[in-house]
Amino acid sequence: EVQLVESGGGLVQAGGSLRLSCAASGFTSDDYAIGWFRQAPGKEREGVSCITSDGKTYYADFVKGRFTISSDNAKNTVYLQMSSLKPEDTAVYYCAAHRSTFIIRTTQGADYWGQGTQVTVSS
């Protein structure tokens, strides 16, 4: 069974940085996509970024140039480096995955979810 565990959330001032981690386990094939979503209070969950096992990456327009996704295959971990954070980035950030190399852009594209980690950006 695929399991995803996020870590690295916290409180940061506007303009600051945080790095989120998603530790993945249970993949039985080499093909996968792991993405990051976020959900702010009263809003729908939205796709932020995604990386696939064959090296494709995706960024939502609202994070391009500020966030960077990467993976460490030896550690089975995907990272989301977030810089130049804004108060509107405040949300619970979720890691999501599926067993293919298609980019995950919407919640319907994910089969597995982590429990989420809170990111709060103060002004």
Image (cartoon, rainbow, N blue to C red):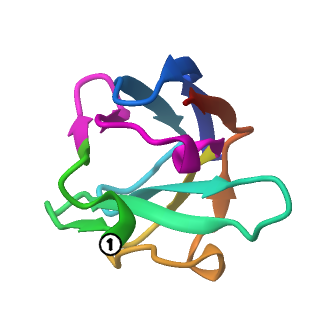
Q: Is residue 104 above or below residue 27?
A: below
Q: Is residue 115 left or right of residue 48?
A: right
Taking the image as drawn, is residue 122 in sight?
yes
**Element at badge 1?**
helix
Disc 1 residue crowd, few under 14, some 14–19, many 20+, Cα 10 Å:
few
Q: Confirm whether the magenta stretch covers residue 76.
A: yes
Left or right: residue 103 versus residue 58 is right
Looking at the image, which is closer to me, 93 or 107? 93
Q: Quadrant of residue 107?
A: bottom right
Q: Relative to residue 121, is residue 62 depicted above or below?
A: below
Position in image of residue 21 (x %, y %)? 44, 28
Q: Is residue 90 left or right of residue 24?
A: right
What residue sits 46% from the left and 66% below the top?
A: 99
The reply to whether the magenta stretch includes residue 90 is yes
**Residue lying at 69% horizontally and 38% vertically, measured from the top left:** 116
**Residue 15, position as x, y percentages in the image:** 34, 30
Which residue does the numbered mark 1 point to in the structure image? 61
Coordinates of residue 77 in the picture (x, y in percent) = 37, 31
Q: Residue at x 14, y 60 (%)?
A: 55
What type is the residue that disc 1 sits on?
Answer: Asp
- The span picked out in magenta is 70-92
Tell me where residue 10 appears, x and y as whole percent.
59, 18
Q: Residue furthest right?
A: 42
